[in-house]
Amino acid sequence: MDNELRLFPRLAWSRVRGQLEYRLSFALMLIGYFVMTLADFLAIWVIFQHLPLLAGWSLGEVAFLYGTSYVSFRIADMVVGHLDMLPTLVRTGALDTVLTRPLGSLYQVVTIDFGLRHVGAIAQGLVILVIACTTAGIPWDAGRALMLLVTIACGTAIFIAIWIVGATTVFWTLGSGLEVLNAFTYGGNQMANYPINIYAGWLRRIIAFFVPLAFVTYFPSLYILAREDPLHTPELLRFASPLVALAALLVARAVWGQGIRHYQSTGS
Amino acid sequence: MAIIEVRDLSKQFRVARPREGARGPLARVRREYTDVRAVERVSFDVEPGEMVGYIGPNGAGKSTTIKMLTGILVPSGGRLTVAGFEPSRQRKEMARHIGVVFGQRTQLWWDLPLADSFTLLKHIYRVPDERFAANLGRCIDTMEMAEFLRTPVRQLSLGQRMRGELTAALLHNPEVLYLDEPTIGLDVVAKSRIREFLTSLNRDAGTTILLTTHDMGDIERLCRRVIIIDRGGILYDGDLERLKARFATERTLVVDLEEPAPALDVPFATVERVEGPRQWLRFQRADTSAAELIAAVARAARIVDLRVDEPSIEDVVLRIYAGAAKGIAINDPSPG
């Protein structure tokens, strides 16, 4: 574990250098992500041109949810987004090479790439977040500032966990589970962008407690924005994100362990 | 004490297939499972410093065995230790003591200069600076790699890449080196360079080498001992020379005569083929020596040129299969 933490910057940097070998494709990718984020946020803005409030939330508040969720999601994407490649690693036998090295298998698959191309998207999310922080009428204090950092860290951890669990399913489905994975990761980000009280009750329960998307930003944001919860959930939930994130990561690690064991006993 | 100990090692795969007659969206869900026995009760020992060829036809269970030895696959039965470790339970610890080269895969970083892969591996295996410099220097010298160290791996020729793969597998001084098809796709020069390097590695560093290959030249140049596997079980385990003496008894003398002649009539040999002035004479090692046969031919006609063809290991393996089909016992009573 110690060795693995020490190695991380070195491996990540090697990936960045590898990507910079292909400068044009790197530049195009940055521009692509820029346009995507812009289009995304424009959609929210258009909604507010027609409605002053969305289920009781102002544009500034929704922008805050959007910003925190988006930044968390893109950091997670940068670190583990290439788990999408797992079916390829299995098919080409690259996963076999991983298993012959003195490092954890999940760690190695994660460090196979480092999505530096996502920094553009992260920066854009941060811009939206900064604007939201000044326009959403937040009663700023030290506790709220700290909570913002905790929210982004926990949101990132929850997205990482979702990504790992989703990607691990390929050990059983042999590649046909990627659409499901995308529904939970990219789709999950889309859902977390909006206040969860706009969703139907059954869907809300799934995103609150099964795939814990509500803990990415909705619950902690209630505290930061000093808002009443339209759903009247217990106040304690607003501070539960760190525990939920930790639990999610532990579940993800256990699921990965099962997946690798399944691979090692089937070898396909 | 043996460095690789394999006892009754077995591996079964569950293979899913759609149920007979199943159609439509549920076909993938309603599947039947059949067990395929890839390796069945295989046992052998490898002593430190041995160089063993592990051969057999496609699908015989070679790769499955290597994958269990390297900790990639978990055995379904039997016992297995490598350098004192149990591969499936102590995968990470064992990894420091073994080196693996899969000829058709890469362990190098595709988009970086070759030397950068070595530096990353140095840190992954925590190789001390001096040891790293010494090991890398020796590989660079003996395999003449200096000129392409700064070339990105994706631009290397297959032969250059393979030298890089070998170096990558040896930086941490593994006690055991597994090679799966190390010379596949290489030209004659590249092959002989790799073989020379492996011979000197085994002689100087005492590295134990287990080699799977389809290239019988690899086996003949490198291995004194061969293990032949077929249909998941061991067919032969023992000395290569003894195997040849037993199953490679037939040789062929090829002579070029001064002018075309009808099939020669010499004792202990049968003419297999006549092509102009060239004739192929098959003979048994036990019946006559090559020298006696050549003398007999020379008495009958004027020889311009000649050569003696030894049977390839491939022929030998084929003959073993034929023998096995007839129930002939072939296992070497005293392996090694």
Image (tube, coloured by chain):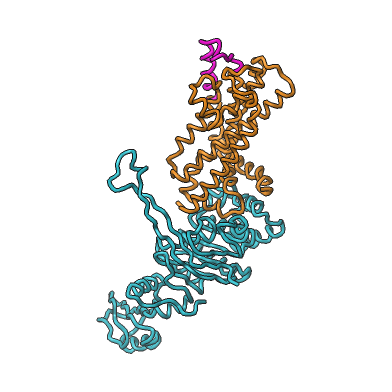
Of B84 and A103, the residue lying toward us: B84
Q: Is residue A267 visible?
A: yes
- Identify the image quadrant of residue A248: top right
Of B122 and A178, the residue lying toward us: A178
Residue A67: x, y in percent? 60, 23
Residue A223: x, y in percent? 66, 21
Magenta segment, principal secondary structure?
helix
Compared to B271, does A179 lie above or below? above
Of A61 and A238, the residue lying toward us: A238
Compared to B265, does B247 lie above or below? above
Q: Which portion, as a residue range, is magenta? A: A36-61
Residue B90: x, y in percent? 60, 57
Residue A21: x, y in percent? 58, 41
Which color has been applied to chain A in this rendered view?
orange
**Identity of the residue drawn at 45% across and 51% down:** A268
Horizontal relation, residue B286 to residue A155: left or right: left
**Identity of the residue drawn at 62% across and 23% down:** A234
Residue A206 drawn in magenta: no
Q: Which chain is cyan?
A: B
Compared to A257, does B307 lie above or below? below
